Image: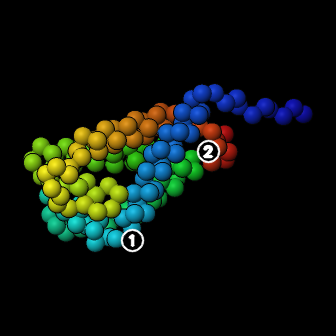
Amino acid sequence: MTVAAPPRSDARDWVGLVARLLLGGVLLVAGLLKITALGTSRTATRAYDLMPVDVANFIGTLLPMLEIVLGVLIIAGLLTRGAARLGGLLMLAFIGGITSAWARGLTIDCGCFGGGGSVGENQTKYLQEILRDAGLALCAAWLVVRPQSRWSLDRRWWG
């Protein structure tokens, strides 16, 4: 009876780990910062002026919970491909919302890590926020294409 050697790890496994920790960490932190101030989260969502108030309030309430769940799954490397797909879609939605606010001349804080709502014209950080979310979307894309990575529960439980 021979025991198969564990699969070798390569640089792509480390890239996957870094992508998991970045994307999952940002989602988890963002969700945790908003979950304790759902009123502010709803205000931030309404500030984009993209949907009816009731829908914006619902999304502002649901979003922190979704970010926490996705963050935990991605950090743990559990159901990585699906969680990364949803995390990537969230990043694309955030990019779309920020781009829309910028194009329409709104002066708002993105509300990504709590806060949100109107700010002074010189306080907007749209380009930095778009670039950050684009980088996180690339992390998500990597994990969708190659969900295996170091120290993931997916690999440990399902090979």
User: Residue furthest toward the left?
Assistant: 104
- Where is residue 37, by image quadrant? bottom left
User: Horizontal and vertical percent for residue 18?
Assistant: 53, 39
Residue at 20% x, 49% y is 124
| Residue 36: assigned label | 1
Residue at 24% x, 46% y is 125
Q: Quadrant of the N terminus?
A: top right
Q: Is residue 48 visible?
A: no
Tag 1: residue type?
Thr
Secondary structure of residue under mark 1: loop
User: Horizontal and vertical percent for residue 35?
Assistant: 39, 68
Residue at 43% x, 50% y is 26
- Cα distance in 3D space between marks 1 and 2: 29 Å
| Mark with earlier residue (1, 2) | 1
How packed mark 1 is, by other alpha carbons closer than 10 Å (few <14, some 14-19, many 20 or more), is: few
* Residue sitting nearer the eye, 103 or 72: 103
Please name which of the two marks, 1 or 2, marks the residue nearer to the observer. Answer: 1
